[in-house]
Image: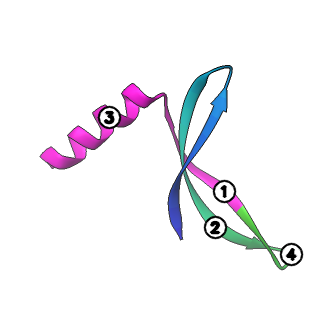
């Protein structure tokens, strides 16, 4: 399963595309792609709509 993860660091929000993977019988999150701050997320979504 792939989903969007948000981390708040020093009042800034950072976005990551992560997926769930099983490691030694436990579920872990693996970062697929670092997206960045919210303005980067908006531009990525706009570009995806155009394609």
Nearest the viewer among 42 and 50 is 42
Q: Which-is-in-front pick, marks 3 and 1?
A: 3
Distance, label 2 to label 3, CA atoms, is: 24 Å
Furthest residue toward top: 10
Q: Disc 2 vs disc 1: Cβ atoms closer than 8 Å?
A: yes
Furthest residue toward left: 50
Chain-order first, disc 1 or disc 4: 4
Location of mark 2 (residue): 20
| Residue 24 position within the rendered picture, expressed as x and y whole percent measured from the top left | 86, 75
Nearest the viewer among 10 and 32 is 10
Q: Which-is-in-front pick, marks 4 and 3?
A: 3
Q: Disc 2 vs disc 3: Cβ atoms closer than 8 Å?
A: no
Chain-order first, disc 2 or disc 3: 2
Chain-order first, disc 3 or disc 1: 1
Distance, label 1 to label 4, CA atoms, is: 14 Å
Location of mark 1 (residue): 30
| Residue 1 position within the rendered picture, expressed as x and y whole percent measured from the top left | 54, 71
Location of mark 4 (residue): 24
Q: Residue at x 63, y 38 (%)?
A: 7
Furthest residue toward bottom: 25
The quadrant in which residue 27 appears is: bottom right
Give the structural element (helix, strand or loop) at label 4.
loop
Up-down relation of residue 45 to residue 25 (above or below): above
């Amino acid at each position: 399963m792939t989903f969007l993860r948000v981390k708040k660091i020093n009042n800034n929000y950072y976005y990551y595309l992560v997926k769930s993977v099983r490691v030694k019988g436990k579920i872990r999150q693996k970062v697929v792609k670092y997206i960045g701050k919210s303005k980067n997320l908006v531009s990525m979504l706009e570009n995806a709509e155009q394609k």
